[in-house]
Amino acid sequence: MASTNVAHLPLYLLLLSLLITTSSSAAEAEQPVHDLLLSFKASLHDPAGALASWSSSTPYCNWPHVTCTAAAAATNTSSATVSLSLQGLGLSGDINASALCRVPGLAGLSLASNAFNQTVPLQLSRCASLVSLNLSAGAFWGPLPEQLAALAGLTSLDLAGNDIEGTVPPGLAALRALQVLDLRGNRLSGVLHPALFRNLTSLHYLDLSGNQFLESPLPPQLGGMASLRWLFLQGSGFSGAIPDTFLGLEQLEALDLSSNSLTGPVPPGFGLKFQKLLSLDLSRNGFSGPFPNGVEKCLMLQRFEVQGNAFTGELPAGLWSLPDLQVIRAENNRFSGRLPELPAGASRLEQVQLDNNSFSGAIPQTIGLVRTMYRFSASLNELSGSLPDNLCDSPAMSIIDVSRNALSGPVPELRSCKSLVSLRLSSNGFTGAIPASLGDLPVLTYIDLSSNGLTGAIPAELQNLKLALLNVSYNRLSGPVPPQLVSGLPAVFLEGNPGLCGPGLPNNCDAPSREHQGLALAATVASFVTGAALLAIGAFAICRKFRGKKSSPWKLVLFHPIKITVEELFAAFHEKNVIGRGAFGKVYLIELEDGQRVAVKRLLSSGKLTFREVKNEMKVLAKIRHKNIAKITGFCYSEGEVSVIYEYFQKGSLQDMIYAPKFTLGWNDRLKVALGVAQGLAYLHHDYTPCVLHRDLKSSNVLLADDFEPRVAGFGIHRVVREKAYRSSLDSDLNHKCYIAPEQNFTKNPTNFMDVYSFGVILLELITGRPAEQPVAKDCSDIVSWVRRRINLIDGAAQILDPSISCTAQQGMQAALELAVRCTSVKPEQRPAMYEVVQLLRTL
């Protein structure tokens, strides 16, 4: 009997094991929802305690960030439809997707804007009831899992703003219910598989933008997605022509193909099919040929952007009369023909940019009658005739640029241009006097009248303006230059006018007699000869002294007369003289023999540029002259290292002031700093040729003069160190990351809008009184995130605005806050240009 029992023991054990396993699986399947959610929570790192109140003692439908359907929430039954919205909570850790996917009825999951730093969990494919999955900006990396194709009921998939790499799996075509697919701002590569778009016919929204490593033509199958309303493919390496099948996308409201390598003509009938289109952006490609007619049928069109191509012929005639059109950007093409008169009463145009084309004829008289027009620029064309005197009848007109045309006649009185910020009329044939009434325009900041035939004196009324630029060079002006203009601007903006006189100019107004002039000239020549002889003797003595010694590998180039030698420069590279540290090296304060002080930025990772290349780049930067730009006085070169010499200011940098124990600067002075920095950047971006991007803007690069007038320093370093060394240095500077625009990591080509983002961070520092780096904040580490967390709260403004500032300034600070939030928008296209920032700050 005993032996029989022993013989059956293995069978008993097997049955017992199966029973235990079955019971365990059943218990697991019936595990309460709140236990599953608490298991999921336990896998997370929650530094801000956002999920601290999740507790089994409280119904899970009442937990923060958990949403249940109304009927189920009343009973807290396991049949509830549950959504988790955990975006922007600073979460990290290993996601327990196994527990999460056993939550019955889990319909929505958002883990966006967190810091998980892991691959997309494959087990999320088991969340069979998911309808919406948002993992955007969650620091996910690695390949895009094809297993997500198992989520058959998914209608929205958002993985934007991560480091997802590799190809887009064709298996995702199984997601036939998908309406939203957002993969923008990743590192996707390769060719898009045709099957993917052949089956996703329910898509309303598709965004593949900012994937610079894609190497794909535009899939013709996209044209079969008849439900598509928003299509964003900008900046993703697409090439070839636009397929004719795109004409089937009749529901499109927004189409952005900009910043790719697309070529060829635009398909005929392109506009006829898109009668619901609101925004069209084909800019910065290689399109050619005439733009097809039919766009006049796009009666809802608001933005027409085709700049940076090789289009020829005339702009479509019906374009100008579209009732809702706000923006026409066609600059940098080969368009020709005459500009039509506009339907002044009905037009809603705000911005017309036609620069660098071959347009001819007169400027339309109706431009100034469009009440919403704030920018009209048509430089580098063949326009002729006079400048309409009603060009500023639009109360919004802020920017006029018709430079480098064949315009003639007098510069009209522009008394009604009360909003005018920038007036550019250079390189035309204007004659007569500069209107004194320009001095009455309250916000006029930039005036360029150079290379015309203007005569008479420079009006003293221009001294009423707070000018950042006045260029009247190469005209026929005469007489004394108003004193404030001479002291505030370098002579380069006045040159080419022999009749002008004043302090610092060749003609000092108090003209001596010809005899005295001759004697003075002779004395000058004699002094020069004597000085040259002494210099030669000194040089000969030095050469003898150092004969036989190896020549120094260092080359010193000075753009302004300062007394310093290479030996003195390197003797001062001592730790006690360090006044700043940045991504590219240390900044030293050096006192010269004559008591003058300079700041020297030593670039230790300066690439492999030759001396000649560095000199050429430094010349470009050293020629920049603006009251809000720090002057570069020289540089010192040796292979592998460059040291840049700047003017020095006793008050130090804005960062020094913000990091002081108490930031005591008043709001008016803070606003003055913000406006000055904005004016300096606007000059670099829009007024200096060639355009210069700063790319290292931060509060430590904003120097302060005695009257708190800021000087922007550290600009254009990337031109000297080159891109590879520049990016490598930035990656090593953790403190700088707070100022870097989010698109920096996935774009090849830097843009002005990256500088705008950095400026927005500085503006937030001035508004809050807090540094950009927030090491003591519990809920985030940078000021942009800190502000975003609070701005929509009921008392958000009270938490954000610096409490040390008087309540009387609250309204202005609130307006500045709104501007700073726009400047730090995640999407570059939503940030304002710097000339707009200047205009808005001037109104404060």
Image (cartoon, grey):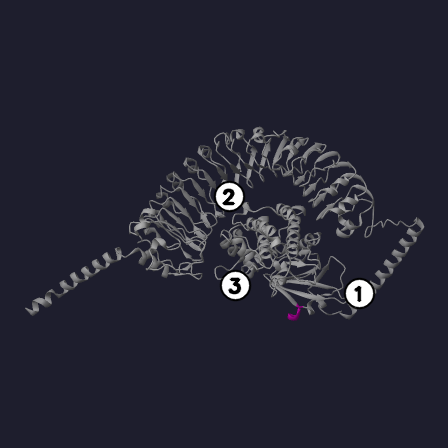
**Counting residues from the N terminus, which is met first, the one under dot 1 or under dot 3?**
1
Residue type at tag 1:
Ala
Mark 1 secondary-structure assignment: helix
The stretch in magenta equals 573-577
Foreground tag (1 vs 3): 3
Alpha carbon distance from label 2 to label 1: 60 Å
Question: Mark 2 = which residue?
Answer: 234
**Label 2, residues with CA under 10 Å away: few <14, some 14-19, many ≥20:** many
Give the residue at x 43% y 55%.
140
Q: Is residue 137 above or below residue 578?
A: above
Of residues 514 and 65, the one drawn nearer to the viewer in this rendering: 65
| Quarter residue 55 falls in | bottom left
Type of amino acid at the residue the image marks with label 3: Pro
Question: Can residue 355 be seen by looking at this rendering?
Answer: no
Q: Position of residue 73 (x, y in %)?
A: 33, 50
Residue 539: numbered disc: 1
How far apart are the alpha carbons under marks 3 and 2?
A: 36 Å
Amino acid type shown at disc 2:
Gln
Q: Splitting the image into 4 quarters, where does residue 525 fall?
A: bottom right
Q: Is residue 671 above or below residue 550?
A: above
Q: Residue furthest right?
A: 515
Q: Residues within 10 Å of mark 3 (few under 14, many from 20)?
A: few
Indicate which label's residue lies in the foreground, 2 or 1.
Answer: 2
Q: Is residue 277 above or below residue 821?
A: above
Q: Main secondary structure of the magenta part?
A: helix
Q: Residues within 10 Å of mark 1 (few under 14, many from 20)?
A: few
Residue 47 falls within the magenta-colored stretch: no
Q: Point out which mark residue 775 bears.
A: 3
